[in-house]
Image: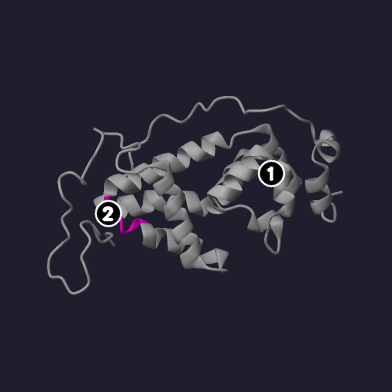
Amino acid sequence: MARENRWPPRRSGDSGPVIPSQMEFRYCDEVVYYCGMTRDQFWALIEKARDRAGDRPGRMCDALRAELENQMPAEVAAFAAMLRECVLEADTWDLRAATHMLRDRYSEDDFDAFRYWLIAQGETTFERVLARVEALAEHNLGVHPPEDCFFREFGRVPHEVYEEMTGEAVSRVDDSMPGDPGGKAWTPRDLPSRFPRLWARLAGRLN
């Protein structure tokens, strides 16, 4: 069954669509990147979604979807692009180590899902952990960290919303060749000494 095209949105009680002004309805040729949204607005939308979800992390995707459905398609595409930039920014050896310690293994799929979870925690946590991964030891990692700290579905939300609004996929820049991870490489045997606090937090599960 075809999805309902939700763009333009309607106000409650209105018979017609809400048409944004020409100044607000902005695109950047084929690839919408930062058009119409700043980094502060990006993080503000995530915070609004977190407030909407409350203490129920499982509802974060629905909460983000509700926030994005109130935006213009150009802004949803810009949100998706900025989300991807944060994922690339978080490509560090230290965060790869955190993924390994949480899962007791490492894979690229796990690392992507972990980075989406980290972004979903909001700007303050994202920046703190990016600066010092051991800050994760002080963060709420959920009831079962090997599962609760991985959130691949979060990254799909803006793409799904944009497609529902426009009937088209979000245009993307070529992200198939990300740069090398930032920071210093490690081996699994380095982890207890290099990240003692986070290792101790997870020591009950790891061998």
Q: Residues within 10 Å of mark 1 (few under 14, many from 20)?
A: many
Check disc 2 and give the amino acid type. Met
Does 116 appear in magenta? no
In which quadrant will I find the N terminus?
bottom left
Per the image, the residue denoted by label 1 is 99
Q: Quadrant of residue 144?
A: bottom right
Q: Secondary structure at mark 2?
A: helix
Spatial distance from mark 1 to mark 2, Cα to Cα? 34 Å
Q: Predominant secondary structure in magenta? A: loop
Residue located at (74% from left, 51% from top): 137
Residue located at (86% from left, 37% from top): 193
Give the label on residue 24, or none.
none
Q: Earlier in the sequence, mark 1 or mark 2?
A: 1
- Residue 168 on image: x %, y %: 28, 46
Horizontal side, residue 56 vs residue 47: left or right = right
Q: Please state the extent of the stretch shown in magenta in the rendering.
A: 68-72
In the image shown, does 64 or 113 lie closer to the viewer? 64
Residue found at the far bottom of this picture: 13
- Residue 91 on image: x %, y %: 59, 34
Per the image, the residue denoted by label 2 is 165
